[in-house]
Image (cartoon, rainbow, N blue to C red):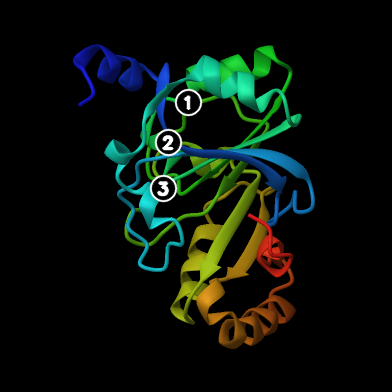
């Protein structure tokens, strides 16, 4: 049972429900192929039915961990730190990112944007979802828009989202892994007709790494 003092620290972002942390290769989007340290934070109510980390949804299952501990581990491995989830913006990211920047580390986030943007970020990957769309200023701040394509209607959603981001935001369509054989053809056709988009693949899964 987590006591009230710990819950207060979590609310302030001084502790976070840490699901896992690991050093690997970024497999997706603009920074694919980059050695990166991932910090996966628990807690998400966006509820994508195809999510491959549903065990991250319930924050209560993941121990509140001090940001000092998290940053100390991250600094041992890489200059590029990727904060993901779950939905990391469920929590206040200001303390974590400030501590990472003290170590001169590059801070990246992968988020649906379903909660207000907090934190100091060198790279924001916005991956919006239909059932809980982005809020606040994140459309203007995003460096990369990544739409997961599960069916043809997601391409309509993709165009709607692309109209909202800033003009320098890089646009990616990524097939949902379980239906990739069918979706790949659809995405290639869409990108050929709409060359503002690029294709993103989950290369880490093809390489069989975490």
Residue at the disc numbered 1: 93
Q: Quadrant of the C terminus?
A: bottom right
At numbered mark 1, what does the secondary structure look like: helix, strand or loop? loop
**Residue 163 in the figure: left or right of residue 102:** left
186 over 52 or under it: above or below: below
Q: How far apart are marks 1 and 3 (CA)?
A: 16 Å
Tag 3 secondary structure:
loop
Q: CB atoms at circles 2 and 1 under 8 Å apart?
A: yes
Residue that label 3 marks: 134
Which badge, 2 or 3, is on the more N-terminal residue? 2
The disc placed on residue 89 is 2
Q: Is residue 182 above or below residue 104?
A: below
Horizontal and vertical percent position of residue 208: 69, 64
**What's the mark number on residue 109?**
none
Residue 25, given in percent of the width and then of the height, sits at 73, 49
Q: Distance between the residues labelled 2 and 3?
A: 11 Å
Q: Position of residue 73 (x, y in %)?
A: 62, 24
Residue at 52% x, 54% y is: 127
Q: In which quarter of the image is the N terminus?
A: top left
Mark-to-mark CA distance, 2 and 1: 7 Å
Closer to us: 11 or 144: 11
The residue located at (74%, 52%) in the rendering is 30
Q: In this view, does 119 lie to the left or right of 42?
A: right
């Amino acid at each position: 049972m987590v006591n009230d003092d710990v819950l207060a620290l979590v609310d302030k972002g001084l502790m976070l429900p840490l699901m896992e942390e690991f050093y690997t290769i970024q497999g997706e989007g603009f920074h694919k192929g980059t050695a990166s340290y991932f910090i996966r934070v628990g807690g998400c109510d966006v509820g994508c039915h195809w999510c491959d980390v549903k065990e991250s949804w319930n924050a209560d299952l993941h121990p509140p961990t001090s940001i000092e501990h998290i940053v100390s581990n991250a600094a041992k491995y890489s200059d590029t730190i990727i904060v993901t989830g779950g939905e990391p913006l469920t929590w206040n990211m200001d303390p974590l990112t400030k501590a990472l920047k003290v170590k001169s580390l590059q801070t990246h986030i992968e988020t649906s944007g379903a909660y207000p943007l907090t934190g100091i970020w060198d790279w924001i990957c916005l991956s919006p979802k239909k059932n809980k769309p982005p809020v606040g200023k994140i459309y203007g701040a995003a460096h990369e828009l990544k739409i997961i394509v599960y069916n043809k209607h997601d391409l309509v959603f993709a165009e709607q989202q692309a109209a909202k981001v800033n003009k320098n935001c890089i646009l990616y369509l990524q097939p949902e892994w379980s239906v990739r054989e069918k979706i790949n053809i659809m995405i290639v056709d869409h990108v050929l007709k709409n060359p503002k988009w690029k294709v993103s693949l989950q290369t880490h899964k093809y390489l069989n790494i975490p």
